[in-house]
Image (cartoon, rainbow, N blue to C red):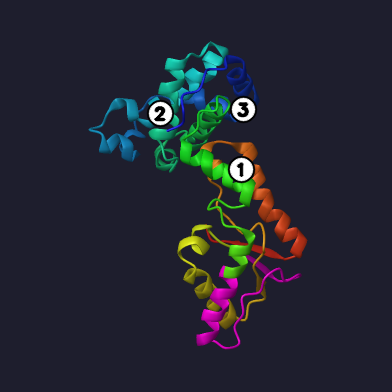
């Protein structure tokens, strides 16, 4: 859990104003409280059908935050924090059954963005975002360790397929292959197995020495500025290497 932060009403109001748009306002106001979303939510079903966990009720909490703007207090923020981070995984099952197509996932993500304005974000997500800025990936893998892992996996691969390689920073390739940062950290063999598929398929591909992590936990945190930074790392790598396509495994 994030450390308790002092409430900054003006920052909260600014975040509300920045995130308000016609579509979001429509979603927040059009709900007919029909209840069709209730049984689609695993939080609701797993907690004895607690009415507070009905998706429509959680969406109403975000509407309340938008109406409060700079009138929030610590008690409201604490409850709101748990609603948007602890009671919704943004799976969108509820939206599939909503007759109005209300996107609770986007509403929840917007609510998380309001919490970001207060510095109230789960601690592990904060650490992950810091790792993106410092290392360019969520697992604190250094460039040296990343290259070493690719070279090691290439050696392992060549024991089975002598002509196979794991190209790094190859310009003009058809495809840039990106991975979940857990792979070099915990499951490096996944990379060699993908390389085997590319080799046997005759694919013209490469991996990049930077911008290779295709996860974006900043997006789940609701920190859109950091999420944009993470996405830009991959785009920059693709443009620098002049590849035609990017393959994202995540």
| Nearer the camera: disc 2 or disc 3 | 2
Residues in magenta?
Answer: 149-177
Gap in angstroms between the C-alphas marked 1 and 2: 21 Å
Q: Tell whether 50 sits left or right of 176.
A: left
Task: Decide if residue 240 is on the left or right side of residue 30.
Answer: right
Residue under label 1? 227
Q: Measured along the vertical axis of the image, is residue 245 above or below residue 3?
A: below
Mark number, residue 82: 2
Is residue 139 located in the magenta-colored stretch of the structure?
Answer: no
* Depth order, front residue of 207/145: 145
Image position of 188 (left or right of 37): right
Sequence-first tag of 2 and 3? 3
Task: Tell me which residue sits at (51%, 14%) in the image.
Answer: 72
Element type at marker 1? Answer: helix
Q: Is residue 72 visible?
A: yes
Q: Quadrant of residue 227?
A: top right
Residue at x 50%, y 19% (from the top left corner): 65
The residue that label 3 is drawn on is 19
Asked if the residues shown at circle 1 and circle 2 are in contact, with their CB atoms under 8 angstroms apart, the answer is no
Q: State whether residue 2 is above or below residue 165.
A: above
Percent position (x, y) of residue 197?
54, 77
Q: Outermost residue, bottom direction?
A: 162
- Nearest the eye: 214 or 27: 214
């Amino acid at each position: 859990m994030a450390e308790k932060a002092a409430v900054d009403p003006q920052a909260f109001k600014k975040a509300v104003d920045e995130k308000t748009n016609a579509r979001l306002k429509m979603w927040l106001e059009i709900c007919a409280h029909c209840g069709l979303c209730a049984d689609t939510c695993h939080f609701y079903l797993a907690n004895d059908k607690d009415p507070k966990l009905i998706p429509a009720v959680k969406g109403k909490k975000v509407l309340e935050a938008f109406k409060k703007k700079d009138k929030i207090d610590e008690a409201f923020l604490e409850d709101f924090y748990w609603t948007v981070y602890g009671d919704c995984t943004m799976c969108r099952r509820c939206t599939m059954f909503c007759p109005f197509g209300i996107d609770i996932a986007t509403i929840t993500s917007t609510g998380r963005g309001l919490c970001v304005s207060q510095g109230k974000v789960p601690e592990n997500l904060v650490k992950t975002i810091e790792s993106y800025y410092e290392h360019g990936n969520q697992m604190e893998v250094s460039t040296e360790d990343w290259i070493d892992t690719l070279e090691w996996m290439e050696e392992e691969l060549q024991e089975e397929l002598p002509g196979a390689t794991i190209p790094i920073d190859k310009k003009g390739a058809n495809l840039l292959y990106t991975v979940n940062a857990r792979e070099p950290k915990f499951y490096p063999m996944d990379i060699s197995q993908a390389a085997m598929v590319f080799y046997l398929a005759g694919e013209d591909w490469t991996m990049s020495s930077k911008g290779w992590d295709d996860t974006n936990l900043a997006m789940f945190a609701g920190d859109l500025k950091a999420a944009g930074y993470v996405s830009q790392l991959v785009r920059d790598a693709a443009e620098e290497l002049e590849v035609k396509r990017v393959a994202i495994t995540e």
